[in-house]
Amino acid sequence: MTQIRRAQSDADFARLHGILIEYEADLPPELRHGSVPSVADLQDEYAGRRAAFVALSNDAAIGCVAVTALDPTTAVLLRLFVSPQGRRRGVARSLVEAAIAFARENGYDRMTLDTHKAQLPAAYRLYQSLGFVECRPLTEVTYECPTFMELSLSRRSDLNR
């Protein structure tokens, strides 16, 4: 059975650090971020209205996702990853659902993300199935052909610009 929980303890952040190393290595080379923050930096980065979630199976991390802020009303979903042994079990969906719930609980009106729909088609389809729609670029990224997406977290549905 898989457990999804917000990273809060030292052990959770150590697991998060480990799964982020795996995530970075799993990405196509042109989509890699370059480095993984230290455990201490992750603890600072994902406090308050920002969070990281880990998916655990038998106490081992098999996935992660994070939420940061673009501005006071806009959450950013990033670092979604499920290790190969955890795939096709609904782990990615559960992680994104936990991130969406966290963003709603913390007063964000919308959630945004960037992906590469041609190189990461499973992620793109997952985001679509959860109600994310393509939108205008929200920030600059370091890779070519990004796909920006957003999800309204309020009852309004006027965010498809």
Image (cartoon, grey):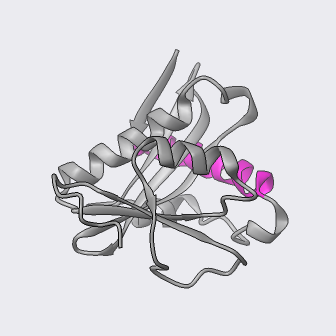
Task: Let me know if residue 138 is in the magenta part.
Answer: no
Q: Where residue 90 appears, x then y in whole percent?
A: 54, 27
Magenta stretch: dominant SS? helix
Front position in the image: 42 or 104 = 104
Front residue (pair 134, 66):
134
Give me the residue at 73% from left, 48% from top: 22
For image coordinates 52% across by 34% down, the residue present is: 55
- Point out residue 46 in the picture as x, y percentages from the top left corner: 39, 60
- Which residue is outermost to the top? 1
Residue positioned 17% across, 58% down in the render: 156
Left of 73 or right of it: where is 93? right
Residue 94, image x, y percentages: 45, 33
Position above or below: 154 against 139: above
Looking at the image, residue 45 lies above or below residue 59: below
Q: Which residue occupies the extreme bottom position in the image?
A: 140
The stretch drawn in magenta includes residue 22:
yes
Is residue 137 depicted above or below 8 in this figure? below
Residue 41: image location, x then y, percent: 50, 67
Q: Quarter of the image containing the C terminus?
A: bottom left
Left or right of 134 in this view: 20: right
* Viewer-side residue, 1 vs 104: 104
Quarter where residue 88 is shown = top right
Residue 8 in sight from this viewpoint: no
- Count of numbered marks: 0
Query: Relative to 89, is 27 above or below?
Result: below
| Residue shown at the point (69%, 74%) measured from the top left | 145
Q: Which residues are magenta?
A: 7-27
Whether residue 99 is visible to the viewer of this picture, yes or no, is yes
Q: Quadrant of residue 48?
A: bottom left
Left or right position of 157 against 138: left
